[in-house]
Image (cartoon, rainbow, N blue to C red):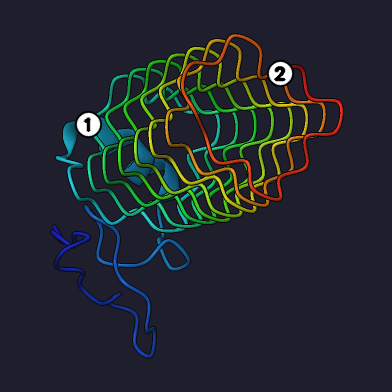
Amino acid sequence: MNTSTHYAPARCSVSGCEAFALTGADTCWTHLPDRDGWRAMLADLDLNAAWLAEVDLSGRDLSGWDLRSARLSEACLRGANLSGADLRDAFLDGANLVDANLEDANLEFAILGGADASGACFRNANLQRSNLVGTRAHGADFSGANLYYARPGNADLEGANFHNARIQRTIFRRANLKNADLSGVEGSANFENANLEGAAR
């Protein structure tokens, strides 16, 4: 079985393919012959620093999983249950997190740049020092979340709920916070050139 990881990715075994193989497989997601079988054995794999780029895990129950430093770039996690998951240092850039449940998840230092997290739940999640640059999160729920020194610059957070969130040193520079709920937030954040039209404060 291939042990391709984020720190030591192996090439896909298909001739001519330049992509990297998934952890637990010999091929990349595009060339994976038995996707259902691979998904079924995921729970038995060590996914710490796993290479999971572009995989489709939409609607899956991943609650409490250890995905530290995992490479989930451009993965489809739409509607997935990631509540309580450990995603510290994980790469979720360009991922589809629409309607995903990340309540109580640990996303410290995680990279979500360019991801679509519209309608996602980050309630009480740890997002300290996370990279949310350019993230789209319309109507997402960040209530009670810890966003200490997080960087949602240029993010589209229209209608997002930050009620009672901790935003000390959070960098909302040029973010769209139109109609967002910022009531009860704790801490001082950087709102330079942010759109706060209709935001509740």
Residue 89 percent across, percent down from the top left: 27, 46
The residue where tag 1 is placed is 66
Q: Amino acid at mark 2?
A: Asp
Quadrant including the C terminus: top right
Q: Residue at x 17, y 43 (%)?
A: 48
Residue 140 location, quadrant: top right
Residue 51 location, quadrant: bottom left
Q: Secondary structure at mark 1?
A: loop
For residue 148, above or below residue 116: above
Q: Residue at x 37, y 76 (%)?
A: 19
Q: Amino acid at mark 1?
A: Asp
Q: Which dot marks residue 26?
A: none
> Of 37 and 139, which appears nearest the observer?
139
> Of 10 and 172, which appears nearest the observer?
172
Q: Which dot marks residue 181?
A: 2
| Marks 1 and 2 in Cβ contact (< 8 Å) | no
Quadrant including the N terminus: bottom left
Residue 152 percent across, percent down from the top left: 55, 45
